[in-house]
């Protein structure tokens, strides 16, 4: 069945509506970053850049490094933007824009988020790197999709029973990382932990400026939770959406976090640009290693 013009929205040049991209513009390996300026911080390490496009906060560079084709795209902040980016990237990979029909043979993409994050555990120091084994979504995005089959229901049940925040109209969901993709990024530089994806930066992460948070011990409660010998280690704003939508579409995804703040000790990185750049270089080294597929 053909997809209607209000469902699959294309620009006059045939590109997808928000991202302004054509199917041939993206590689199978896609790095996502939040900050549009960070796209060039990644692509500067490419051997060559074949494409630069942008619209709104969505900046895309596609190029090659050591013979591997890679796309890096900025998502902006939040899972509302992730909903746009992941759905439109899947459309580029798996929908025929001419006939407006879904391709019978599906193309699998690999998503690697390079992002920044704040730790809620004293044992996760600033300037360290963390790979999210699961994402706890406080944003509600996955509840708008038939997503039960891709979520970690056991983790959801145990966390929601522990928190008891249903009385606050808060019921987080949980999605796991892709283990096969994560295996390529296992290193003595990488810590592992459960990541909480929040719906905002201030109240939803327990920050108190002039509007007091409804749950004052939000971070402390999360930090005290344990699941299969893993703790909730850090807070950010995109990973649950990336993990959930990637799994729904049959793609692979991992989230790599540069820890720039420690909410327990009150510290913030004194050289955040250096930490982010080191994570970028680490990621590209792993992507271009001989065993990456």
Image: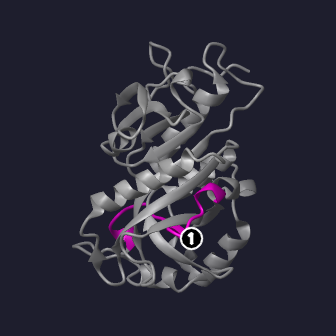
The way the protein has been coloured in the rendering is: one colour
In depth, the one of 250 and 124 nearer the eye is 124
Q: In the rendering, at what x and y percent does residue 214 appear?
A: 38, 77
Location of residue 23 with respect to 220 vertically, above or below: above
Location of residue 93 with respect to 287 vertically, above or below: above
The residue drawn where x is 62% and y is 55% is 184
Q: Quadrant of residue 94?
A: top right
Is 263 one of the magenta-colored residues? no
Residue 78 appears anywhere in the view? no
* Image quadrant where one finds the C terminus: top right
Is 187 one of the magenta-colored residues? yes
Q: Quadrant of residue 171?
A: bottom right
Instruction: Please provide the residue range marked out in magenta.
Output: 183-205
Q: In the rendering, at what x and y percent does residue 261 appear?
A: 33, 72
* Image quadrant where one finds the N terminus: top right
Q: Secondary structure at mark 1?
A: strand
Q: In the rendering, at what x and y percent does residue 91 appear?
A: 60, 30
The residue drawn where x is 41% and y is 32% is 61
Residue 21 appears anywhere in the view? yes
Q: In the rendering, at what x and y percent does residue 240 appear?
A: 55, 58
* 157 lies left or right of 261: right
**In the rendered image, which residue does mark 1 sit on?**
192
The residue drawn where x is 73% and y is 72% is 154
* 159 lies left or right of 104: left
- Which residue of the protein is positioned furthest toward the left in this rendering? 210
């Amino acid at each position: 069945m053909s997809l209607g013009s209000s469902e699959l929205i294309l620009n006059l040049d045939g590109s997808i509506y928000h991202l302004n991209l054509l199917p041939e513009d993206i590689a199978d390996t896609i790095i996502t970053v939040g900050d549009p300026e960070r796209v060039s911080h990644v692509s500067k390490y490419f051997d060559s850049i074949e494409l630069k496009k942008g619209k709104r906060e969505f900046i895309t560079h596609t190029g090659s490094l050591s013979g591997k084709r890679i796309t890096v795209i900025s998502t902006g902040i939040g899972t509302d933007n992730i909903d746009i980016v992941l759905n439109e990237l899947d459309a580029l990979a798996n929908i025929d824009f001419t006939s407006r029909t879904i391709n019978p043979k599906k193309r699998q993409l690999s998503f690697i988020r390079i992002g920044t994050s704040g730790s809620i555990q004293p044992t996760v120091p600033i300037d360290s790197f963390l790979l999210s084994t699961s994402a706890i979504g406080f944003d509600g995005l996955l509840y708008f999709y038939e997503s039960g089959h891709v979520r970690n229901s056991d983790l959801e049940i145990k966390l929601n029973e522990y928190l008891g925040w249903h009385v606050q109209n808060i019921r987080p969901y949980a999605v796991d990382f892709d283990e096969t993709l994560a295996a390529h990024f296992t290193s003595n530089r990488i810590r592992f932990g459960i990541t909480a994806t929040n719906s905002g930066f201030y109240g939803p992460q327990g920050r108190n400026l002039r509007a007091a948070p409804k749950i004052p011990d939000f971070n402390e409660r999360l930090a005290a939770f344990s699941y299969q010998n893993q703790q909730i280690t850090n807070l950010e704003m995109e990973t649950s959406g990336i993990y959930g939508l990637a799994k729904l579409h049959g793609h692979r995804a991992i989230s790599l976090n540069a820890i720039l703040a420690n909410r327990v000790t009150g510290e913030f990185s004194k050289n955040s640009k250096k930490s982010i750049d080191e994570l970028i270089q680490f990621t590209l080294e792993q992507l271009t290693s001989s065993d990456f597929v």
